[in-house]
């Protein structure tokens, strides 16, 4: 037995050690909870601010994005009507009322012609009113009528001279100086004392200006949105336009009267809001913690790209104390409770940790999928018993929904490639062998003349949805919509080995689906041109706005083949290169060797008849006879060619 060693009582030692461990563990837990809680609060607050700012930005962008297509559709309808018979003021007013009813966010829809006549429809507190004026002998005669739900008109107002000339208004001068639609800067609507903005589209026929279509937005709804987005007791959302003009503030007046003149919008520096002044000095999109006096603020500034190239921004900010109040008291309570019940807390903490870590692991996996732009599906999110995790689930679901909306504008493969590279999109391109596809809707004019505008819009939406889905199913990329036509390509951004065959399959499926969509009594078909070859593909445009598209002779050839369908009485025309690459999957008959502008040699073109998988004996026979006929004709064996073409005529009388 060794002697001289210091010995301790086991019960006492155990009590001291356990007590020390309880004290140290409880103290560490309290300290760790305080630090982690503060970090989590700041992270969640930043995410919340980002969500609020993006919600305000998304609402604003969606609010304004409806104007250009609506104005262009109205201009096309009026042009079509005018080609049949001169459009009367009454007809034009009815068209404006229809557009206003179809778009609840619009305040005014109007048309000003080159003679100073004005026809429009606008919203009142009780409904819709038509406003028409004309200039006679230097005087502007005004008539207004209220529109009943059954479209009956009731006289509401008449003035013999309002001195109003739309040609002198900023929207008219801006539009007439441009070849396309323009946005006015925000201004105060006359007589309404609310901020607004106008989209103006010049109406030209044969290069001659006939007038200007306009769509007005009442921006007062942005202030309503700013008031509704109360994410904390002291939180505020402010919307600013170019030049830091205030468009929305939850509490402050944003319109200032001017003695002897029209009221103007308030500049941000005129607000009695020091947080706004401090944020103005920060870069756009910067997350910030601001010290203003004795108060710390958490803030977020997010840019909004408004149609027309204007740059607005949303400011979201709140005192940090809104989120951290009571954190110190909770730390002390946590320490006391930990000292008393650390053993129980170990078990409870383990259970709770499992309840927290599992959904967080699921969130991390889902966010990794989103990071790879895998946003397909709309599976229901798992609800959590913890508010913060549930908020993260909600935010993630909204983010996926926003990305799905964004994916409607940009090819998904392109976005995935950009995310994988981690680099910003820049002007760039490469020469690659692709298949390019052009389509145009034949018979659309007849359909447009026999259908109401809202029916026409619904049909076009269904048409573009179905055609785009077919192209996407065959791994094609929709480049753009050209009126009622579609441009697409295969083989980019992701390489596809059988791009020519897939383009041909998409063309045949599109024709079949279009026949199913055609209304009774209306014959619709799509003229489609497909060409394969080397093109320049990449991000093309300006430094501010890029378009992932293709350029080159092959793209031009596809467009010309689409047009050549008219001359040959066909619907699906492909070039020789496409046929050579796709002939294992499709049945096609040679049509001719044609001279195409920009090509030194003739191009052999084909008509798509069917898919090989269809096992269509008639199509196969037509293709074989057409090949014999054209080969004999080119070899100057005209009797053999005539015989073979007679066989073709037997199938295609």
Image (cartoon, helix red, strand yellow):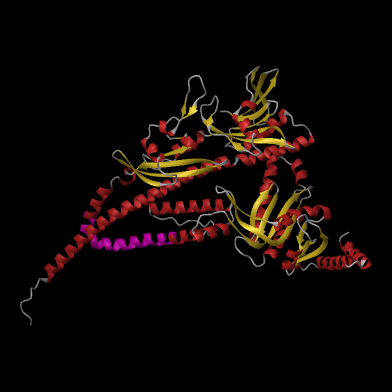
Residue with the most extreme left position:
4
Quarter of the image that includes the C terminus: bottom right
- Compared across the picture, whether 211 is left or right of 627 comes to left
- The majority secondary structure of the magenta stretch comes to helix
**In this rendering, is residue 38 above or below 128?**
below
Residue with the most extreme right position:
639
Which residues lie in the magenta part?
336-363
Would residue 43 be visible to someone looking at this image? Answer: yes
**In this rendering, is residue 147 above or below 415?**
above
Could you say where residue 282 lies in the image, as x and y percent from the top left? 40, 43
Residue at image x 61%, y 30%? Answer: 122
Could you say where residue 344 lies in the image, as x and y percent from the top left? 26, 62
- On whether residue 606 falls in the magenta region, the answer is no
Could you say where residue 32 lies in the image, as x and y percent from the top left? 27, 57
**Residue placed most toward the observer, 101 or 149:** 101
Quarter of the image that includes the N terminus: bottom left
- Compared across the picture, whether 427 is left or right of 590 comes to left
């Amino acid at each position: 037995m060794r002697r001289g060693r210091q010995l301790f009582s086991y019960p006492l030692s155990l009590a001291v050690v356990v007590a020390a461990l309880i004290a140290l563990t409880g103290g560490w837990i309290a300290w760790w909870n305080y630090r982690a809680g503060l970090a989590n609060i700041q992270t969640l607050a930043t995410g919340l601010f980002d969500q609020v700012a993006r919600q305000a930005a998304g609402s604003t962008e969606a609010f304004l994005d409806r104007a250009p297509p609506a104005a262009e559709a109205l201009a096309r309808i009026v042009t079509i009507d005018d080609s049949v018979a001169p459009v009367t003021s009454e007809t034009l007013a009815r068209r404006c009322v229809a557009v206003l009813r179809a778009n609840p966010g619009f305040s005014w829809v109007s048309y000003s012609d080159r003679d100073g006549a004005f026809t429009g429809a606008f919203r009142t507190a009780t409904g819709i009113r038509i406003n028409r004026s004309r200039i006679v002998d230097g005087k502007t005669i005004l008539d207004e009528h209220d529109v009943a739900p059954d479209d009956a008109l009731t006289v509401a107002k008449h003035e013999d001279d309002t001195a109003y000339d739309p040609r002198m208004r900023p929207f008219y001068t801006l539009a007439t100086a441009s070849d396309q639609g323009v946005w006015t800067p925000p201004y105060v609507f006359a007589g309404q004392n609310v901020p607004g903005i106008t989209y103006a589209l010049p109406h030209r026929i044969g290069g001659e200006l006939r007038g200007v279509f306009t769509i007005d937005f009442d921006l007062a709804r942005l202030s309503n949105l700013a008031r509704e987005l109360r994410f904390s007791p002291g939180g505020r959302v402010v919307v600013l336009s170019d030049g830091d003009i205030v468009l929305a503030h939850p509490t402050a007046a944003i319109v200032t009267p001017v003695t002897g003149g029209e009221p103007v919008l308030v500049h941000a520096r005129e607000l009695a809001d020091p947080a706004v002044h401090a944020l103005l000095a920060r870069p756009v999109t910067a997350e910030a913690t601001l010290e203003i006096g004795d108060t710390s603020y958490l803030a977020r500034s997010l840019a909004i790209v408004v149609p027309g190239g204007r740059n607005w921004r949303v400011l979201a900010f709140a005192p940090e104390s809104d989120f951290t109040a009571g954190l110190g008291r909770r730390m002390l309570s946590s320490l006391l409770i930990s000292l008393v019940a650390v053993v129980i807390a170990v078990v409870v903490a383990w259970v709770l940790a499992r309840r927290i870590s599992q959904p967080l692991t699921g969130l991390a996996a889902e966010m990794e999928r989103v990071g790879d732009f895998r946003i397909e599906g709309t599976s229901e999110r798992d609800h959590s018993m913890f508010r913060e995790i549930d908020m993260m689930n909600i935010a993630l679901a909204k983010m996926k929904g926003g990305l799905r909306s964004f994916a409607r504008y940009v090819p998904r493969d392109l976005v995935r490639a950009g995310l994988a590279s981690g680099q910003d999109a820049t002007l760039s391109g490469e020469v690659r062998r692709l298949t390019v596809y052009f389509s145009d809707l034949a018979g659309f004019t007849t359909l447009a003349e026999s259908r109401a505008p809202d029916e026409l819009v619904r049909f076009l939406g269904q048409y573009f949805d179905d055609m785009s889905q077919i192209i996407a199913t065959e791994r094609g990329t929709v480049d753009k919509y050209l009126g009622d036509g579609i441009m697409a390509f295969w083989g980019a951004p992701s390489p596809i080995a059988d791009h020519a065959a897939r383009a041909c399959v998409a063309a045949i499926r599109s024709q079949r689906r279009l026949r199913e969509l055609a209304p009774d009594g209306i014959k619709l078909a799509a003229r489609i041109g497909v060409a394969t070859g080397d093109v320049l593909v990449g991000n093309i445009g300006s430094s501010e706005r890029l378009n992932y598209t293709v350029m080159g002779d092959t793209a031009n050839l596809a467009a010309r083949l689409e047009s050549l369908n008219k001359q040959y009485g066909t619907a699906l025309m492909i070039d020789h290169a496409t046929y050579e690459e796709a002939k294992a999957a499709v049945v096609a008959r040679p049509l001719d060797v044609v001279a195409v502008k920009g090509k030194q040699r003739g191009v052999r073109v084909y008509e798509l008849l069917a898919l090989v998988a269809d096992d269509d004996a008639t199509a196969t026979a037509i293709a074989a006879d057409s090949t014999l006929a054209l080969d004999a004709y080119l070899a100057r064996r005209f009797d053999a060619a005539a015989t073979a073409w007679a066989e073709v005529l037997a199938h295609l009388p």
